[in-house]
């Protein structure tokens, strides 16, 4: 059997001679088959040829074509040819011949895992190929020194071990990189608060703050603040917000509040959580609820055309609650200036937290949302600072982000060229702001999402 052909070119500098060796650059030939390699020479003949295997001359292989039958595994190697004429000589590039060999392949890729801080976990991969592929583990695309086995054990895990792991496998016939596996380190830190500041609208522009809880029931404080912002900002505020709390996709709210009323229970909760105070007669709204681990949303409606914020607080009294907020989001109109969408959030605890943050605009149209923001830009700040920690304009279909979408349960972005924005970031405990604006001061409806990577 004659193998496939591929041209490999080499030139001889200033001499008027060049050669092209024809052979399979990286292919597998069946044991017992026939292998043929040949060369085409440019220049003035006559030519003399000498074929080499692994750099060593092959006795009698002195023609433009070298053929051998009944190929065996031992015939595998690097084949090249020296061609000379009266002007000099040239060596062709190498043609890799593999007999009874197969390209590297992954039979089992490493899996995404969550491990407690200080714990131990093992990532594993299964491969095939002949000769046996070499293995190189990578963290965030960088080779891990000494990590060349089929398993990778991580002991006494810390935040430094969190990231995206992949495996590069190679043999003479090529290389393959595994799909990404995310290792998340679960410490005592958690998402404890989010506040969404924008100008509430109606219809698709309604301010909707969503959140997902997991693990166990938890106490949640939700506020819709308009006039209560007046002492802190110079811009006009939303005059009379009304708050509606929904479970899942229910058509009717499970709780509503128009004016919070200055109740003792809510006042004490504000003070305990560090939420800024509200006057007892203000038209701001608030509810305190014990919620099962489910999906919820809070809608801010009412009268006004100024700024308002929707706030969601983890109101559990325990420092290490068994229930967690694993996702916070908001969908509303994105304006310009003070009208951009600002999602402030707090990470409580003592260890860094890895998050997925997204600003979705054009993909909202596939879900029937009119007036979507065509090109959102996402910027992340530490609270009280003007220095951007990380930013993203277009997510560009990054494999690391695609893997994170699947792990967190975020809906897929099927168009790698969409102008939606996304980032993965590891943050120390503290307060932060994710700011969503339209590129070129454009406006429209956008969704900002903050996911705890498990």
Image (tube, rainbow, N blue to C red):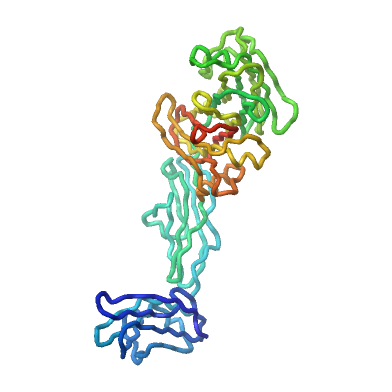
Q: Which quadrant of the figure has residue 289?
A: top right
Residue lying at 57% horizontally and 20% vertically, measured from the top left: 308
Q: Which quadrant of the figure has residue 270?
A: top right
Residue 180 position (above or below residue 411): below
Residue lying at 47% horizontally and 40% vertically, measured from the top left: 392
- Please give the count of numbered marks on the rendered protein: 0
Residue 258 position (above or below residue 127): above
Q: Which quadrant of the figure has residue 37?
A: bottom left
Quarter containing the C terminus = top right
Compare residues 412 and 336 and report the one nearer the observer: 336
Location of residue 315 in the rendering, given as x and y in whole percent from the top left corner: 58, 23
Compare residues 419 and 114 and report the one nearer the observer: 419
Compare residues 342 and 43 and report the one nearer the observer: 43
Residue 306 position (above or below residue 381): above
Location of residue 206 in the rendering, given as x and y in whole percent from the top left corner: 64, 26
- State whether residue 62 appears in this view: yes
Residue 220 position (above or below residue 228): below
- State whether residue 436 appears in this view: no
**Residue at the limit of the structure toward the bottom, as seen here:** 60
Q: Left or right of 94: which side holds 110?
A: right
Residue lying at 62% horizontally and 16% vertically, measured from the top left: 304
Location of residue 177 in the rendering, given as x and y in whole percent from the top left corner: 48, 59
Location of residue 379 in the rendering, given as x and y in whole percent from the top left corner: 46, 34
């Amino acid at each position: 059997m004659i193998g496939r052909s591929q041209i490999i070119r080499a030139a001889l500098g200033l001499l008027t001679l060049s050669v092209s060796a024809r052979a399979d650059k990286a292919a597998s030939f069946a044991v017992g088959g026939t292998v043929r390699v040949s060369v085409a020479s440019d220049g003035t003949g006559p030519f003399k040829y000498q074929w080499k295997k692994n750099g060593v001359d092959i006795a009698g292989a002195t023609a433009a074509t070298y053929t051998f039958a009944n190929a065996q595994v031992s015939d595998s190697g690097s084949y090249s040819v020296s061609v000379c004429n009266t002007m000099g000589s040239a060596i062709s590039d190498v043609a890799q011949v593999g007999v009874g060999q197969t390209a590297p392949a992954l039979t089992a890729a490493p899996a995404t895992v969550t491990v407690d801080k200080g714990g131990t976990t093992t990532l594993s991969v299964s491969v095939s190929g002949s000769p046996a592929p070499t293995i190189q583990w990578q963290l965030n695309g960088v080779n891990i020194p000494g990590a060349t086995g089929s398993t990778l054990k991580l002991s006494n895990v810390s935040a430094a071990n969190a990231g995206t792991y992949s495996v590069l496998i190679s043999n003479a016939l090529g290389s393959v990189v595994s799909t990404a596996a995310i290792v998340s380190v679960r410490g005592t830190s958690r998402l404890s608060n989010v506040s969404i500041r924008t100008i509430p609208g109606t219809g698709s522009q309604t301010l909707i703050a969503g959140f997902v809880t997991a693990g166990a029931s938890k106490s949640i404080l939700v506020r819709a603040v308009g006039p209560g912002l007046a002492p802190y900002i110079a811009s006009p505020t939303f005059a009379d917000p009304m708050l509606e709390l929904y479970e899942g996709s229910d058509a009717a709210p499970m709780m509503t509040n128009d004016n919070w009323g200055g109740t003792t229970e809510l006042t004490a909760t504000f003070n305990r959580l560090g939420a800024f105070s509200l006057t007892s007669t203000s038209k701001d709204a608030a509810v305190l609820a014990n919620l099962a681990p489910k999906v919820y949303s809070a809608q801010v409606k009412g009268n006004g055309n100024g700024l308002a914020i929707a706030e969601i607080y983890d109101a559990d009294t325990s420092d290490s609650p068994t229930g967690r907020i694993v996702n916070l989001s908001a969908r509303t109109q994105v304006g310009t200036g003070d009208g951009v969408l600002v999602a402030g959030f707090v990470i409580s605890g003592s260890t860094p937290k890895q998050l997925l943050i997204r600003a979705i605009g054009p993909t909202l149209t596939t879900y029937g949302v009119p007036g979507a923001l065509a090109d959102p830009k996402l910027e992340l700040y530490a609270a009280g600072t003007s220095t951007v920690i990380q930013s993203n304009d277009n997510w560009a279909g990054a494999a690391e982000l695609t893997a994170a979408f699947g792990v967190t349960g975020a809906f897929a972005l099927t168009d790698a060229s969409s102008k939606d924005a996304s980032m993965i970031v590891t943050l120390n405990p503290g307060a932060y702001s994710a700011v969503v604006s339209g590129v070129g001061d454009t406006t429209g409806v956008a969704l900002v999402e903050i996911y705890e990577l498990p």
